């Protein structure tokens, strides 16, 4: 794995028993010695720390910065307050998804768009391509900002103990600048686990103190407070996002999937607050999809028979007819079930018993009310 990128916390992960794997070109821990299930429960019950420095951050600045991002993102960025953030999608003209992103509006002429590691170069090129039509500059700051997440019912108490602001006063999807162990960071009241918490964007280019000191400092402070804090790998990160129904690009989202199929209509603002049509890329196609309707939709199934559903499996009916592909599948620790997400024909009702083809055998499963865990 010598050609893989490494975060600044790589040595810490190895020293603390992290099993390192290739994820989107990065060498990252999939779990530590206690295992992914224990890490999942630790986040739900106390607080988990996640090294997510593989994620990318694009700064968009200039007089027309907001207009540029509003042109590219499905959510209404023009009405996002300064200090606020919104989840949204980047779409092609046909309405299929390039990536899902979070946009922070930091100032009138300054926004930060957080992108997935696997799409960082594609997204940066997409923004650069369209910035030519706007008085705006796009800068990839991914190498200058280190990103960690602190998630769980004790997350806010832990961050409150290491900075001077009242984190609980920061609204969900709000942000604030903080001092953190000798460096500065942007705190976002966001996350990918279905738990309360924050994501931290730590400045590393202008000080000698950075993410390693912050990471160690958080664990030290947790010990002082008697808070059980755990490092969390990719395995638990996946199950933590799966249970509350959060999508993962390349699975519930892709170039072949539109937001309405993925149950993300809430992230698509076809009109602004004045009721006027918005003109983001993909809007025309998505208006058509909304008018006509979709033929398939993302559903969650839980296993009745013993079996582990995986991406690439197929959901079938009682006669063996193929209904749609499984795009994610795993054990969901909080719900204590094996489950999967699949795209099934519209009208498939909760409670419908179907089957998942696993290693050539049809294993009984039932369509289940989403999500498996409610944030």
Image (cartoon, grey):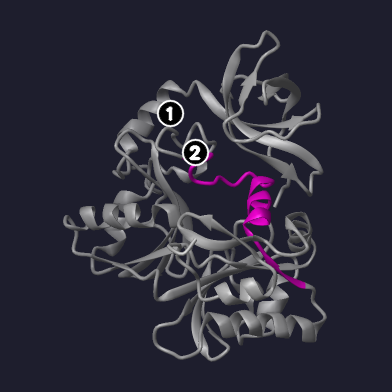
> Residue at coordinates 82% horizontally, 43% vertically from top-left?
336
Secondary structure state at the residue bearing disc 1: helix
The range drawn in magenta is 229-253
> Residue at coordinates 72% horizontally, 35% vertically from top-left?
308
Residue at the top extreme, as displayed: 319
Label 2, label 1: how far apart the Cα atoms are: 9 Å
Mark 2 and mark 1 lie on one chain; the one further toward the N terminus is 2
Q: What percent of the width, then of the height, locates residue 73?
A: 37, 50
Up-down: is 23 above or below 180?
above
Secondary structure state at the residue bearing disc 2: helix
Up-down: is 90 above or below 282?
below
Q: What percent of the width, then of the height, locates residue 362?
A: 71, 19
Marks 2 and 1 in Cβ contact (< 8 Å): yes
Residue nearer the viewer, 36 or 369: 36
Query: In which quadrant of the rendered view does residue 289 lie?
Result: top left
Query: In which quadrant of the rendered view does residue 349 lie?
Result: top right
Q: Report the residue marked by disc 2.
A: 265
Asked if residue 242 is among those painted magenta in the image, a careful observer would answer: yes
Up-down: is 299 above or below 151?
above
How many residues crowd mark 1 within 10 Å: few (<14), some (14–19), many (20+)?
Answer: few
Q: What percent of the width, then of the height, locates residue 50?
A: 62, 66
Q: What percent of the width, then of the height, locates residue 148?
A: 56, 70
How many residues crowd mark 2 within 10 Å: few (<14), some (14–19), many (20+)?
Answer: some
Q: Report the residue marked by disc 1.
A: 290
Asked if residue 75 is among those painted magenta in the image, a careful observer would answer: no
Task: Say if residue 371 shows up in the picture.
Answer: no
């Amino acid at each position: 794995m010598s050609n893989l990128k490494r975060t600044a916390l790589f040595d810490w992960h190895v020293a603390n028993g992290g099993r390192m794997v290739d994820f989107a070109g990065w060498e990252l821990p999939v779990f530590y010695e206690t295992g992914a299930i224990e890490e999942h429960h630790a986040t739900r019950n106390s607080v988990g720390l996640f090294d997510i420095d593989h994620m990318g951050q694009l700064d968009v600045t200039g007089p027309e910065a907001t207009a540029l991002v509003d042109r590219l993102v499905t959510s209404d960025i023009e009405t996002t307050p300064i200090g606020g953030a919104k989840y949204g999608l980047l779409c092609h003209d046909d309405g299929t998804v390039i990536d899902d992103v979070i946009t922070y509006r930091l100032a009138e002429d300054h926004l930060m768009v957080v992108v997935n590691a696997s799409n960082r170069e594609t997204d940066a090129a997409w923004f650069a391509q369209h910035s030519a039509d706007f008085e705006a500059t796009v800068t990839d700051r991914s190498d200058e900002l280190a990103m960690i997440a602190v998630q769980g019912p004790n997350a806010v108490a832990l961050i409150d103990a290491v900075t001077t602001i009242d984190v609980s006063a920061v609204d969900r999807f709000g942000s604030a600048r903080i001092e953190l162990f000798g460096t500065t960071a942007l705190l976002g009241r966001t996350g990918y686990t279905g738990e309360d918490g924050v994501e931290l964007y730590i400045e590393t280019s202008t000080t000698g103190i950075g993410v390693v000191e912050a990471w160690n400092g958080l664990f030290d402070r947790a010990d002082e407070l008697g808070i059980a804090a755990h490092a969390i790998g990719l395995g638990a990160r996946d199950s933590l996002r799966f249970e509350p129904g959060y999508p993962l690009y390349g699975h519930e989202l892709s170039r072949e999937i539109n937001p309405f199929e993925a149950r993300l209509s809430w992230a698509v603002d076809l009109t602004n607050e004045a009721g006027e049509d918005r003109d983001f890329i993909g809007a025309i196609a998505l208006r058509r999809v909304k008018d006509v309707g979709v033929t398939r939709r993302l559903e969650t199934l839980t296993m009745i028979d013993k079996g582990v559903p995986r991406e690439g499996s197929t959901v079938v009916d009682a006669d063996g007819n193929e209904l749609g592909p499984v795009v994610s599948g795993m054990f969901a620790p909080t719900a204590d079930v094996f489950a999967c997400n699949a795209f099934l024909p519209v009208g498939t009702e909760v409670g419908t018993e179907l089957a998942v083809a696993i290693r050539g055998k049809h294993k009984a499963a039932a369509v289940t009310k989403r999500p498996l865990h409610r944030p």
